[in-house]
Amino acid sequence: MVCHEFFITPGIFLALTFVVTVSAQIGRPPYGPPVPAAPSTVQPDLRVKLPRPNAPPPGIWDTSARDEEETNGPLRHLRGKAEIEGSDVKLTADEIDYNEDTHEVEARGNVVFHQYAKDEEIHADRVEYNTETETGKFYNVRGWSRTHVDARPGLLTSNSPLYFEGEWAERLEEKYILHNGFVTNCKLPNPWWTLKGPTFDIIPDDRAIAHRSIFWLKRMPLFYTPYFYKSLQKLPRKSGFLMPNIGNSSVRGKMVGLGYYWAINRSYDATYRVQDFTQRGLAHHVDFRGKPFAGADFDAIFYGVQDRGLLQADGTRIKQGGFSLYSTAKADLGDGFMARGTINYLSSLTFRQAFTESFNEAIFSENYSVGFITKNWSSFTFNTVFARLENFQSTQPHDSIVIRKLPEFEFASRDRQVWERALPIWVSFDSSVGLLRRAQPLFQTSQFSERADVAPHVMTAFDWKGFHLVPGFSIRETQYGETQQDLHVIGQNLIRSTREFTADLIAPSLERTFNRKTWLGDKLKHVIEPRVTYQYVNGVQDFNAVIRFDEMELVSNTNQLEISLTNRLYAKRGNEVSEVFSWQLWQQRYFDPSFGGAVVPGQRNIVLSSVELTPYAFLNGPRNYSPIVSVFRGSPKPGISFEWRTDFDPLLNRFVNSGFTTDLRKGNYFISAGHNSVSCLPLLPSDAGQCQSATPDTSRLLSPKANQIRGRVGFGDPNHRGWNTAFDAVYDYRQGIMQFATAQVTYNTDCCGFSVQYRRFNFGVRNENQFRVAFSVANIGSFGTLKKQERLF
């Protein structure tokens, strides 16, 4: 479990706008030599542990000296490169005096203390140490301790150890008390940041505590804290206050926030953040996580805003507050049963658009919650499903469609071979029974509308000279407890019986190899894959009488043929073969243009055949041919990829939809771009004028016009030392506005980073500019208003 680890006490943050001169309280230690102004240090690489050949056994201490080793009873006097070594500790100095009876050691001159078990190294001018109690005092001390790197998105990392200096220090078994010193994880001798204070309490591999300390950036004090805690554990968990954050928004005003992390016990924790938007109100964020038992965990997040309202020119306010709840959980119930679930609830679309920090979330109009218990064995699957789907139609209150399953039971089997002789036969089936509900303005079913469905399927296969024919036949029986007529629910049962026949014909692939070296590789191979699929469905007599709950209600009568052709180009580079280009074309031919009466002229029609072909609507009446769908993909070189998807409508003799995406990366340079274009198509020829209207009536359009471009360009990555910069934008050509734009500049040193980000929102109910800043400390965290999920890198 990833937990927080950077805490201070509340109310002590000093803004730099009123920085005063602060100096470290450096004085003479109680005893020992004076501290040199700038001791010379060389920072080691603690990623490599030192070997321990011929180490003494526990309780035994070996001594040696280069120049002189004198013994006087229990006293030993070592001079010149003197050493005393135990099983886990080694002490070297110019001079060492050791009493074997009292276990007292005094070392003077260039003292180096190394603790091998935890990889600690301390340099000092003089050391008094007891080998039995493992306690001692170190004067003019400089030391290092290995730190665990917990790499997380948005966290600057470094392999540098934690370095500390002080006038003197004392070791109490596993603990070090450092007096009048500082700590840092920057490279010396000129660290970017230091934390200076009169007292530091350090337990290597556990934690570091500073009292009455000042955080310095070079020679500039950033903040003062009477208590600072930094975990040195691999998975730190410690209750405490989080770093405060401040910022500014053109709509929300000044933003000031503070948080608290509560490590309840080893299985549960909670985080609470409160943020004051001076022009709007208070925002609350609660994150509760836990592991109730082995194999189970959950995470629940609540976010709400007590909004005073958006101030209008006439002095009135429009309130946009609300809340959102997101939770995810999973559990191993034993005996092969698994439970998983996600809750996603939103009080209103207006709240999401006004207060979310994610553009993609703000323009998403759906909320989907689902929970299920499943078990798989042999070829069978059993599911118990609870689901709720809410699709917001606008920002108006209660203008949404809600579909609910409470619950639905599913029992299915994948293809299972039951006959292996001359004619192989596979069987499978799907079945479900559930209580459903649909509610929307002016239309709703009963609280529990039943639906039961069963669909057995049988399939075989024929092979002949590379040709593969795969026919299949299925029967589907679906029973509904309610139907609809003229947008009114009728409490009348309906049994829908369908028969479906499919046949897949896969022709042999055509291949050709080119043994010529090109810029794509040493060899090239071109493969053509043709495929034909025939589908016949009959038995749907009342397509428009069925209440729409999911894709099951989109099944219609059809008699169609789908033809597809795929071209693939492979390149061999050394011993590696990869697909560099592919171009797939497919189209459907309808022998029943009206789909058994399901397709009505002059309105937008959705049937399962059209949904499976393309996500764009094209049925505004009966037709014999679908658009030709083309998908061209390429990845000719590492770091280069693209995809271009288009729909060409032969009835209109033009491209009606197009979507293009590309990603390029070369070293630390990267470019990502995308363009999406949807043609305006009227339902009837008389509605063509709606496509030129500034405010078209979308009820008279098959698809409204859309034309957007997305792009991101930048240099760097989260851990790139030096300058990093990126720009991201979404531009709507139809409206002629930049809906979203963000630019970020970051400078990372070896141990800290500075980030400035500008964000622009302009869509729906939101028109806002934001400036965000953050200061990051490697391996520790960051403070400011730029959160990890909002960073460009």
Image: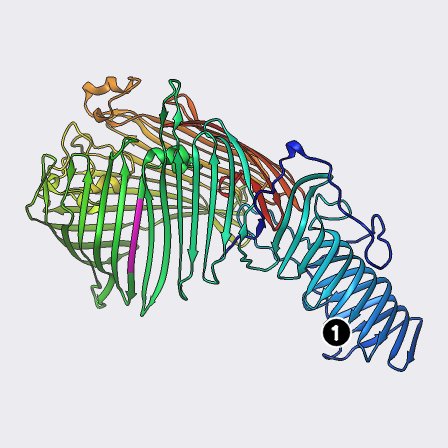
Q: Is residue 474 left or right of residue 771?
A: left
Q: Which residues are magenta?
A: 368-373
Camera-side residue of 521 and 671: 671
Q: Residue 442 in the image: state x and y as whole percent.
A: 16, 34
Q: Which residue occupies 19% across, 41% down?
A: 439
Quarter-of-image position of residue 329: bottom left
Is residue 371 a member of the stretch shown in magenta? yes
Q: Residue 488 in the image: state x and y as whole percent.
A: 10, 37
Q: Alpha-carbon neighbours of circle 1 within 10 Å: few (<14), some, or many (≥20)? A: few
Camera-side residue of 8 and 569: 8
Q: Is residue 76 left or right of residue 49?
A: right
Q: Is residue 525 left or right of residue 102?
A: left
Where disc 1 sits, the SS reads loop
Quarter-of-image position of residue 702: top left
Q: Which residue occupies 73% across, 45% down?
A: 191
Q: Main secondary structure of the magenta part?
A: strand
Instruction: Work out which residue is located at the far bottom of the displayed protein and give it.
Output: 73
Camera-side residue of 727 and 365: 365
Camera-side residue of 118 and 311: 311
Q: Residue 97 in the image: state x and y as whole percent.
A: 87, 72
Would residue 644 be seen by someone viewing this image from the given angle? no
Q: Which residue is mark 1?
A: 53
Q: Residue 132 in the image: state x and y as whole percent.
A: 74, 75
Is residue 465 a member of the stretch shown in magenta? no
Instruction: Work out which residue is located at the far left of the displayed protein and give it.
Output: 492
Quadrant for the C terminus in the image = top right
